[in-house]
Image (cartoon, helix red, strand yellow):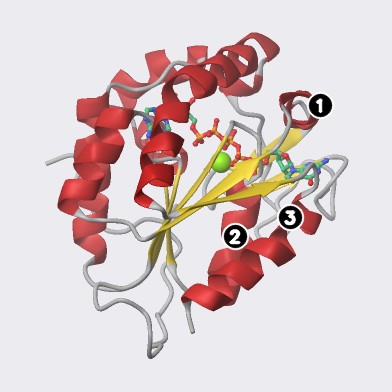
Amino acid sequence: MPFLRPISSCLRLTVSRSYASVPPQGIHALIIGAPGSGKGTISNWIVRDFKLQHVSSGDLLRDHMRRGTPLGQEARSFMEKGDLVPDQTMVGLIASELKALGQGNWLLDGFPRTLPQAETLQKETPVNVVVHLDVPFETIIGRVKDRWVHPASGRIYNTVFNPPKEPFQDDITGEPLIQREDDKPESVQNRLQIFSDSTQPVLDFYDKMGILKVFHGTESKKIYPHVQKYMHEKFQ
Ligand code: G5P
Ligand code: MG
Protein backbone atom coordinates (compact mmCIF):
# COMPACT_ATOMS: atom_id res chain seq x y z
CA MET A 1 0.00 0.00 0.00
CA PRO A 2 2.16 2.91 -1.20
CA PHE A 3 -0.28 5.58 0.05
CA LEU A 4 -0.53 4.42 3.65
CA ARG A 5 2.63 5.41 5.39
CA PRO A 6 3.57 7.17 8.60
CA ILE A 7 3.01 10.90 8.54
CA SER A 8 6.28 12.21 7.20
CA SER A 9 8.34 15.34 7.63
CA CYS A 10 6.42 17.01 4.83
CA LEU A 11 3.36 16.96 7.03
CA ARG A 12 3.86 19.27 9.96
CA LEU A 13 1.89 17.72 12.81
CA THR A 14 0.74 19.92 15.62
CA VAL A 15 -1.86 19.61 18.37
CA SER A 16 -5.15 21.39 17.72
CA ARG A 17 -6.67 23.67 20.33
CA SER A 18 -10.45 23.55 20.89
CA TYR A 19 -12.63 26.57 20.11
CA ALA A 20 -16.29 27.03 21.03
CA SER A 21 -17.67 27.86 17.59
CA VAL A 22 -15.47 25.68 15.38
CA PRO A 23 -17.71 23.23 13.45
CA PRO A 24 -17.86 19.73 15.03
CA GLN A 25 -15.84 18.25 12.18
CA GLY A 26 -13.14 20.90 12.77
CA ILE A 27 -11.66 23.58 10.52
CA HIS A 28 -11.03 22.00 7.14
CA ALA A 29 -9.27 24.75 5.21
CA LEU A 30 -7.82 25.09 1.72
CA ILE A 31 -5.25 27.53 0.43
CA ILE A 32 -5.50 28.03 -3.33
CA GLY A 33 -3.34 30.20 -5.57
CA ALA A 34 -1.24 30.11 -8.69
CA PRO A 35 2.17 28.43 -8.59
CA GLY A 36 4.48 30.73 -6.65
CA SER A 37 1.65 32.83 -5.21
CA GLY A 38 2.93 32.15 -1.68
CA LYS A 39 0.75 29.19 -0.61
CA GLY A 40 3.64 27.42 1.11
CA THR A 41 4.97 30.60 2.72
CA ILE A 42 1.58 31.68 4.09
CA SER A 43 0.62 28.09 5.06
CA ASN A 44 3.68 27.96 7.30
CA TRP A 45 2.54 31.15 9.05
CA ILE A 46 -1.06 29.86 9.43
CA VAL A 47 0.21 26.58 10.88
CA ARG A 48 2.49 28.48 13.28
CA ASP A 49 -0.38 30.72 14.49
CA PHE A 50 -3.37 28.35 14.45
CA LYS A 51 -1.75 24.97 15.12
CA LEU A 52 -3.54 23.07 12.42
CA GLN A 53 -2.10 20.23 10.41
CA HIS A 54 -0.58 21.14 7.04
CA VAL A 55 -0.88 18.86 4.02
CA SER A 56 0.93 20.08 0.90
CA SER A 57 0.14 17.97 -2.17
CA GLY A 58 3.34 19.09 -3.91
CA ASP A 59 5.51 18.25 -0.88
CA LEU A 60 3.86 14.80 -0.66
CA LEU A 61 4.54 14.13 -4.34
CA ARG A 62 8.17 15.31 -4.08
CA ASP A 63 8.60 13.04 -1.05
CA HIS A 64 7.33 10.06 -3.09
CA MET A 65 9.72 11.02 -5.90
CA ARG A 66 12.70 11.13 -3.53
CA ARG A 67 11.76 7.73 -2.10
CA GLY A 68 11.33 6.29 -5.60
CA THR A 69 7.86 4.87 -4.92
CA PRO A 70 5.66 3.82 -7.90
CA LEU A 71 3.55 6.89 -7.25
CA GLY A 72 6.67 9.08 -7.25
CA GLN A 73 7.83 7.56 -10.54
CA GLU A 74 4.42 8.19 -12.10
CA ALA A 75 4.31 11.77 -10.77
CA ARG A 76 7.82 12.72 -11.93
CA SER A 77 7.00 12.75 -15.65
CA PHE A 78 4.07 15.13 -15.08
CA MET A 79 5.69 17.37 -12.49
CA GLU A 80 8.93 18.07 -14.33
CA LYS A 81 6.98 19.51 -17.26
CA GLY A 82 4.69 21.41 -14.93
CA ASP A 83 1.67 19.26 -15.90
CA LEU A 84 -0.95 18.06 -13.41
CA VAL A 85 -0.70 14.55 -11.99
CA PRO A 86 -3.90 12.58 -12.93
CA ASP A 87 -6.93 13.16 -10.71
CA GLN A 88 -7.31 9.51 -9.69
CA THR A 89 -3.75 9.39 -8.33
CA MET A 90 -4.15 12.68 -6.48
CA VAL A 91 -7.51 11.79 -4.94
CA GLY A 92 -6.09 8.49 -3.63
CA LEU A 93 -3.01 10.17 -2.20
CA ILE A 94 -4.88 12.95 -0.40
CA ALA A 95 -7.69 10.68 0.85
CA SER A 96 -5.08 8.44 2.49
CA GLU A 97 -3.32 11.39 4.11
CA LEU A 98 -6.54 12.87 5.47
CA LYS A 99 -7.60 9.48 6.79
CA ALA A 100 -4.23 9.12 8.53
CA LEU A 101 -4.73 12.54 10.18
CA GLY A 102 -8.10 11.51 11.66
CA GLN A 103 -9.96 14.15 13.64
CA GLY A 104 -8.80 17.74 13.95
CA ASN A 105 -8.17 20.93 12.06
CA TRP A 106 -6.22 20.86 8.81
CA LEU A 107 -5.02 23.06 5.99
CA LEU A 108 -4.68 21.58 2.49
CA ASP A 109 -2.20 23.35 0.19
CA GLY A 110 -2.22 22.52 -3.54
CA PHE A 111 -5.28 20.27 -3.59
CA PRO A 112 -7.85 20.36 -5.16
CA ARG A 113 -6.68 21.78 -8.48
CA THR A 114 -9.42 20.48 -10.79
CA LEU A 115 -13.20 20.38 -10.52
CA PRO A 116 -13.34 16.54 -10.22
CA GLN A 117 -10.81 16.73 -7.32
CA ALA A 118 -12.92 19.41 -5.59
CA GLU A 119 -16.17 17.50 -6.05
CA THR A 120 -14.68 14.28 -4.68
CA LEU A 121 -13.14 16.05 -1.68
CA GLN A 122 -16.43 17.78 -0.90
CA LYS A 123 -18.28 14.46 -0.94
CA GLU A 124 -15.77 12.65 1.25
CA THR A 125 -14.33 15.30 3.59
CA PRO A 126 -16.17 18.63 3.18
CA VAL A 127 -14.10 21.79 3.54
CA ASN A 128 -15.43 24.89 5.28
CA VAL A 129 -12.76 27.59 4.72
CA VAL A 130 -11.16 28.46 1.35
CA VAL A 131 -8.39 31.07 1.15
CA HIS A 132 -7.52 32.23 -2.37
CA LEU A 133 -4.23 34.12 -2.83
CA ASP A 134 -4.66 36.30 -5.89
CA VAL A 135 -1.16 37.44 -6.89
CA PRO A 136 -0.42 38.85 -10.39
CA PHE A 137 1.40 36.45 -12.70
CA GLU A 138 4.18 38.98 -13.47
CA THR A 139 4.98 39.15 -9.73
CA ILE A 140 5.16 35.34 -9.56
CA ILE A 141 7.46 34.94 -12.57
CA GLY A 142 9.90 37.38 -10.96
CA ARG A 143 10.09 35.54 -7.63
CA VAL A 144 10.04 31.81 -8.51
CA LYS A 145 13.47 31.93 -10.19
CA ASP A 146 14.95 32.91 -6.80
CA ARG A 147 13.32 30.06 -4.82
CA TRP A 148 15.48 27.47 -3.00
CA VAL A 149 14.03 24.71 -0.84
CA HIS A 150 15.13 22.25 1.84
CA PRO A 151 13.65 19.01 0.45
CA ALA A 152 13.47 17.03 3.70
CA SER A 153 11.44 19.62 5.63
CA GLY A 154 9.75 21.62 2.86
CA ARG A 155 11.26 24.87 4.25
CA ILE A 156 11.13 27.53 1.55
CA TYR A 157 13.68 30.29 0.94
CA ASN A 158 14.09 33.05 -1.61
CA THR A 159 17.47 34.62 -2.26
CA VAL A 160 15.80 38.08 -2.34
CA PHE A 161 12.73 37.85 -0.08
CA ASN A 162 13.69 35.29 2.54
CA PRO A 163 17.38 34.31 2.21
CA PRO A 164 18.87 31.53 4.35
CA LYS A 165 21.33 32.61 7.07
CA GLU A 166 24.16 30.90 5.17
CA PRO A 167 23.97 30.93 1.35
CA PHE A 168 22.32 27.78 -0.06
CA GLN A 169 22.12 26.06 3.36
CA ASP A 170 19.07 25.20 5.45
CA ASP A 171 18.85 27.37 8.61
CA ILE A 172 18.02 24.45 10.92
CA THR A 173 20.04 21.50 9.60
CA GLY A 174 22.77 23.22 7.54
CA GLU A 175 21.94 20.78 4.71
CA PRO A 176 22.19 21.99 1.11
CA LEU A 177 19.21 23.72 -0.50
CA ILE A 178 18.06 22.79 -4.00
CA GLN A 179 16.05 24.38 -6.78
CA ARG A 180 12.91 22.63 -7.97
CA GLU A 181 12.97 21.05 -11.45
CA ASP A 182 9.63 22.67 -12.24
CA ASP A 183 10.92 26.18 -11.48
CA LYS A 184 12.54 26.33 -14.95
CA PRO A 185 10.94 29.19 -16.94
CA GLU A 186 9.15 26.91 -19.46
CA SER A 187 7.62 24.79 -16.66
CA VAL A 188 6.53 27.89 -14.75
CA GLN A 189 4.72 29.28 -17.83
CA ASN A 190 2.98 25.92 -18.30
CA ARG A 191 1.96 25.77 -14.61
CA LEU A 192 0.49 29.28 -14.76
CA GLN A 193 -1.50 28.39 -17.91
CA ILE A 194 -2.79 25.19 -16.27
CA PHE A 195 -3.79 27.18 -13.18
CA SER A 196 -5.89 29.53 -15.34
CA ASP A 197 -7.51 26.66 -17.25
CA SER A 198 -8.05 24.01 -14.54
CA THR A 199 -8.17 25.76 -11.20
CA GLN A 200 -10.51 28.67 -12.03
CA PRO A 201 -13.51 26.22 -12.07
CA VAL A 202 -12.44 25.11 -8.56
CA LEU A 203 -12.58 28.72 -7.35
CA ASP A 204 -16.02 29.14 -8.98
CA PHE A 205 -17.20 25.94 -7.24
CA TYR A 206 -16.28 27.25 -3.76
CA ASP A 207 -17.52 30.75 -4.58
CA LYS A 208 -20.99 29.33 -5.37
CA MET A 209 -20.91 27.53 -2.01
CA GLY A 210 -20.18 30.89 -0.31
CA ILE A 211 -16.95 29.74 1.38
CA LEU A 212 -14.34 31.40 -0.89
CA LYS A 213 -12.38 34.37 0.49
CA VAL A 214 -10.04 36.17 -1.93
CA PHE A 215 -6.89 38.03 -0.80
CA HIS A 216 -5.28 40.24 -3.44
CA GLY A 217 -1.71 41.50 -3.23
CA THR A 218 1.90 41.25 -4.34
CA GLU A 219 3.69 40.71 -1.00
CA SER A 220 3.05 37.79 1.34
CA LYS A 221 3.93 39.84 4.42
CA LYS A 222 1.23 42.38 3.54
CA ILE A 223 -1.36 39.75 2.57
CA TYR A 224 -0.87 37.62 5.70
CA PRO A 225 -2.34 40.02 8.33
CA HIS A 226 -5.64 39.90 6.41
CA VAL A 227 -5.54 36.10 6.20
CA GLN A 228 -4.67 35.94 9.90
CA LYS A 229 -7.65 38.14 10.83
CA TYR A 230 -9.95 35.98 8.70
CA MET A 231 -8.67 32.78 10.30
CA HIS A 232 -9.13 34.31 13.78
CA GLU A 233 -12.80 34.90 12.92
CA LYS A 234 -13.14 31.24 11.89
CA PHE A 235 -11.53 30.06 15.13
CA GLN A 236 -13.67 32.18 17.48
P1 G5P B 1 3.04 22.50 -5.78
O1 G5P B 1 4.22 22.09 -5.02
O2 G5P B 1 1.73 22.65 -5.11
P2 G5P B 1 2.61 25.06 -6.98
O3 G5P B 1 3.01 25.17 -8.39
O4 G5P B 1 1.17 25.11 -6.74
O5 G5P B 1 3.44 23.81 -6.51
P3 G5P B 1 4.43 26.44 -5.52
O6 G5P B 1 5.35 26.57 -6.71
O7 G5P B 1 4.78 25.48 -4.43
O8 G5P B 1 3.03 26.18 -6.04
P4 G5P B 1 3.63 28.41 -3.61
O9 G5P B 1 3.64 27.37 -2.56
O10 G5P B 1 2.33 29.06 -3.96
O11 G5P B 1 4.31 27.91 -4.94
O12 G5P B 1 4.64 29.57 -3.28
P5 G5P B 1 5.86 29.66 -2.21
O13 G5P B 1 6.76 28.49 -2.37
O14 G5P B 1 5.33 30.02 -0.87
O15 G5P B 1 6.57 30.99 -2.79
C1 G5P B 1 7.23 30.96 -4.03
C2 G5P B 1 8.59 31.70 -3.88
O16 G5P B 1 8.31 33.07 -3.65
C3 G5P B 1 9.45 31.24 -2.67
O17 G5P B 1 10.81 31.36 -2.99
C4 G5P B 1 9.08 32.24 -1.56
O18 G5P B 1 10.13 32.41 -0.61
C5 G5P B 1 8.88 33.50 -2.40
N1 G5P B 1 7.94 34.48 -1.85
C6 G5P B 1 6.82 34.25 -1.12
N2 G5P B 1 6.24 35.43 -0.80
C7 G5P B 1 7.01 36.41 -1.37
C8 G5P B 1 6.94 37.83 -1.41
O19 G5P B 1 6.04 38.46 -0.84
N3 G5P B 1 7.91 38.47 -2.10
C9 G5P B 1 8.92 37.82 -2.74
N4 G5P B 1 9.85 38.53 -3.40
N5 G5P B 1 9.04 36.48 -2.71
C10 G5P B 1 8.09 35.79 -2.04
O20 G5P B 1 2.82 21.50 -7.01
C11 G5P B 1 3.90 21.11 -7.81
C12 G5P B 1 3.41 20.15 -8.86
O21 G5P B 1 2.87 19.00 -8.25
C13 G5P B 1 1.75 18.50 -9.00
C14 G5P B 1 1.70 19.33 -10.27
O22 G5P B 1 2.53 18.73 -11.23
C15 G5P B 1 2.30 20.66 -9.78
O23 G5P B 1 2.82 21.45 -10.87
N6 G5P B 1 0.55 18.62 -8.16
C16 G5P B 1 -0.67 18.25 -8.56
N7 G5P B 1 -1.14 17.70 -9.72
C17 G5P B 1 -2.45 17.47 -9.80
N8 G5P B 1 -3.34 17.78 -8.81
C18 G5P B 1 -2.91 18.31 -7.63
N9 G5P B 1 -3.80 18.59 -6.65
C19 G5P B 1 -1.53 18.55 -7.47
N10 G5P B 1 -0.80 19.08 -6.47
C20 G5P B 1 0.46 19.11 -6.90
MG1 MG C 1 4.12 25.30 -2.50
Q: Earlier in the sequence, mark 2 or mark 3?
A: 2
CA distance for labels 1 and 2: 21 Å
Number of callouts: 3
Is ligand 1 less than 8 Å from the beta carbon at label 2? yes
Per the image, the residue denoted by label 1 is 142
Q: Is mark 3 within 8 Å of ligand 1?
A: yes
- Kind of residue at disc 1: Gly
Q: Residue at x 35, y 28 (%)?
A: 114
Tell me if mark 1 has few (under 14), some (14-19) or many (20+) residues whose alpha carbon lies within 10 angstroms of its own.
few
Question: Percent position (x, y) of residue 1?
Answer: 11, 41
Q: Nearer the viewer, mark 1 or mark 3?
A: 3
Q: Secondary structure at mark 1?
A: helix
- Which disc is residue 44 wearing? 2
Residue hosting label 3: 223
x and y percentages locating residue 132 in the rendered image: 56, 46
- Hey, what amino acid is under mark 3? Ile
